[in-house]
Image (cartoon, rainbow, N blue to C red):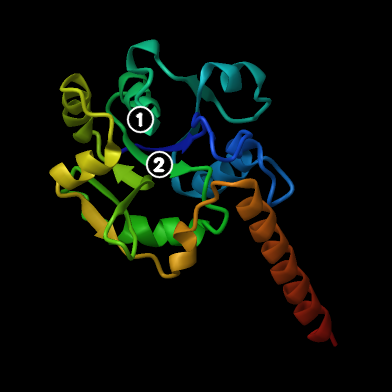
Amino acid sequence: MSLYGLVICGGESTRMGTDKSLLVYYQKPQHEHVADLLAPLCERVILCCNAEQYRTFRTVYPKLADLPQYGGAGPMTGLLSAFETFPGNDFLVAGCDYPYLTTDELANFLHDTDKDLPAAAFYNQNAFYEPLLGWYARSAGNALLKAFENGSRSLQRFLVAENAGKYRPLSEKTMLSVDTIDDFQAIKKALEAENDIQDGDQFDNQP
């Protein structure tokens, strides 16, 4: 069973006012950082991009431009494009919005996911799925396409309809998403402070 990682990059970022996949928290653009998180867990990692990102991204990872027949469907566009382009694979999906996401949390999610289900996703304290922190089995492709053809553009509704698995992460902070410049600046500052504390602890523990 092949597991492909999908980094969903193609959001419009209207509230942010700039491309969220290009934000830097960890010395590289977020689309590269998220791909690095997926890489140890997946046979292959793909960046799902809009047309502009496909043209401009310089990356070691393969890129997949949104297929035009699925345009205007938000994050569903990238997933539908992946199901059509890489049939016969399961997909581990991660958006670029989550600066506290880790490989360990994704590994724990995969371990806890019932692979007999068509899909599973992180599940927040407000009883909503996080569709861009999810696993989508190859068997979900046809159901997702049917939902799209019936006019649905919501991965949230799709996950509810499919009774997808619900994963409560070890840390709620993992699901903290960044939607505004103020959020970005505050979280970047917090991450830098955490790194300074960790570096200080390592220095203190040296003989």
**Does label 1 or label 2 sit earlier along the sequence?**
1
- Give the quadrant of the C terminus: bottom right
Quadrant assignment, res 198: bottom right
Residue 46 coordinates in the image, percent (x, y): 49, 31
| Residue occupying the point 27% across, 43% down | 156
- Give the quadrant of the N terminus: top left
Report which residue position mark 2 lands on.
93
| Residue occupying the point 39% across, 12% down | 68
Q: Secondary structure at mark 2?
A: strand
Residue most extreme to the top: 68
Question: Mark 1: which amino acid?
Answer: Leu
**Residues marked 1 and 2 touching at CB (< 8 Å):** yes
Residue 24 coordinates in the image, percent (x, y): 69, 45
Residue 67 coordinates in the image, percent (x, y): 40, 15
* Vertical comparison of 41 with 173: above or below: above
**95 or 6, which is in the foreground?**
95
Question: Mark 2: which amino acid?
Answer: Val
| Residue occupying the point 65% across, 52% down | 182
Q: Sort mark 2 into few (<14), some (14-19) or many (20+) by Cα contacts within 10 Å.
A: many
**193 or 17, which is in the foreground?**
17
Residue 63 coordinates in the image, percent (x, y): 53, 24
The disc at residue 79 is: 1
Left or right, 59 with respect to 119, comes to right
* Vertical comparison of 89 with 126: above or below: above
The disc at residue 34 is: none
User: How far apart in space, not on screen, are marks 1 and 2 (Cα)?
Assistant: 8 Å
Quadrant assignment, res 202: bottom right
